[in-house]
Amino acid sequence: MSLIKVAIADDHKIFRKGVILSLRSYTNIAFVQEAENGEELIAGVGESQPDVILMDLRMPLKDGIETTKVISKKYPDIKVLILTMYEDERFVSHLMENGANGYLLKSADPSEIRKAIMEVMTRGYYLNNFVNRVLLKKSHARNKAIPSLSTEVHLNDKEREVIRLLCMEYTAAEIAQKMEISPRTVEAIKDRLMERFGTKNTAGLVFFAVKNNLID
């Protein structure tokens, strides 16, 4: 894989420098921007053009939640990895449905941060054990709810298979090969489903699919 350009937004300089230093040994990762808050990040993204942003949640001027929404709307190709101390399920759900590609705690090892960066670049999302627990909990809660025909989601065979393979962490190219269709067709199905379900990216689509039991 070619060089991955990374930006980090966190109002604690020592933590920013620590993350950058901890990932220095990975020669395919280069930090191109540091920011103390969301406004500073947004102002510099056009020039730094990162592939991935490591985003804290609690920051002055513009917090990570609002900044993630702005980035996902204005720069949809940039991947956003939340890197925070907040182990709160509400943040996970809200952010994964509004543009974040993954959610990491600040206690994560550098190897996990590196893994998350690599996976959002290849698959479009990163789901760790913490996020998976949130998904499982939401799935169980939904199963206990009273069924409503008006909220049922109907998928054709191709749509269901694309979502199933996405949830199994296959890339679009791998899905195309397995389904014997073109990668462009896979991307078209993904785009159609994201628009239909109101999700911002592949991560949001996977999150929606698992939360709503769209796969067996």
Image (cartoon, rainbow, N blue to C red):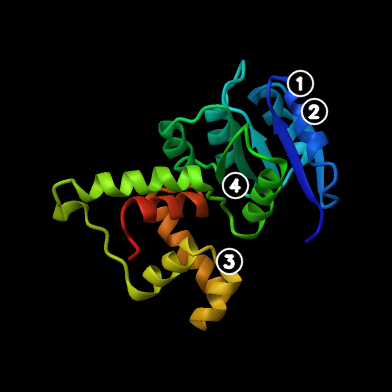
Query: Which residue in the protein does label 2 denote?
Result: 17
Measuring from the top left, give residue 6's x and y in whole percent.
75, 42
Question: Among all residues in the image, which is located at the extreme bottom?
Answer: 180
- At numbered mark 3, what does the secondary structure look like: helix, strand or loop? loop
Q: Nearer the viewer, mark 4 or mark 3?
A: 3
Q: Amino acid at mark 1?
A: Lys
Q: Residues within 10 Å of mark 4 (few under 14, many from 20)?
A: some
Query: Which residue in the protein does label 4 denote?
Result: 76
Q: Amino acid at mark 4?
A: Pro
- Mark 2 and mark 4 lie on one chain; the one further toward the N terminus is 2
- Mark 1 and mark 4 lie on one chain; the one further toward the N terminus is 1
For the residues bearing labels 1 and 3, Cβ distance under 8 angstroms:
no
For the residues bearing labels 1 and 2, Cβ distance under 8 angstroms:
yes
Q: Which mark is residue 41?
A: none
Q: Which mark is residue 13?
A: 1
Vertical relation: 185 (above or below) 77? below
**Dividing the image into 4 quarters, which one contains the C terminus?**
bottom left
**Dividing the image into 4 quarters, which one contains the N terminus?**
bottom right
- At numbered mark 2, what does the secondary structure look like: helix, strand or loop? helix
